[in-house]
Amino acid sequence: MIDISWVPSPSPSVQRVDIGLEAVLVRDDRANCHVLDPVAAHVWRCLDGTTSIERVVTDLAATFDGSADRIRHDVIRLVSELAEKGLVIGPGGADSASVVASAAQDLPRSTNRGTAPVRFLDEPPHP
């Protein structure tokens, strides 16, 4: 299981553009754009290199109505997807991100309710 004490931060090669409550992430190479829904965009703004995944989960659980276990699962899934795409790094650099991304593969994917929180524009649209 992923260590929720991990402290991710945006990769220095990623720029964020806010569009309403959503956000678009663009890498410096402009090869891909990543659209975050409002909740994913909120989580992204919390990934500042000083806040652990555990703290993000605690803050979200206090703000939104939902179980801490469900929120923890969803945040880990989101951060794992961001790490897989190289959009977040940890204190140890990219290696930390790959550890988180590979550990998250054990999480069940069947909990997605509706649209994905991150739409990767380098992939086909989700049905």
Image: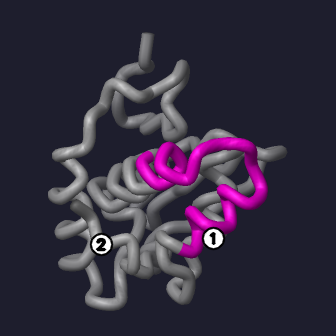
Is 78 magenta? The answer is no
Task: Tell me which label, 2 or 1, sits earlier in the chain.
Answer: 2
Q: Nearer the viewer, mark 2 or mark 1?
A: 2
Q: Amino acid at mark 2?
A: Asp
Residue pushed farthest top?
127
- Image spot of residue 124 (x, y percent): 36, 21
Q: Which residues are magenta?
A: 55-73
Q: Residue at x 51, y 85 (%)?
A: 49
In the figure, is residue 90 to the left or right of 1? right
Circle 1 is placed at which residue position?
A: 46
In the figure, is residue 3 to the left or right of 16? left
Provide the major secondary structure of the magenta segment.
helix
Question: Residue 3 shows which numbered tag?
Answer: 2
In the figure, is residue 108 to the left or right of 4? left
Q: Residue at x 63, y 70 (%)?
A: 46
**Picture quarter with the C terminus:** top left
Q: Secondary structure at mark 2?
A: loop
In the figure, is residue 94 to the left or right of 17? left
Q: Secondary structure at mark 1?
A: helix
Observer-nearest of 70 and 17? 70
Residue pushed farthest right?
20
To which quarter of the image does residue 57 belong? bottom right
Q: Residue at x 40, y 63 (%)?
A: 87
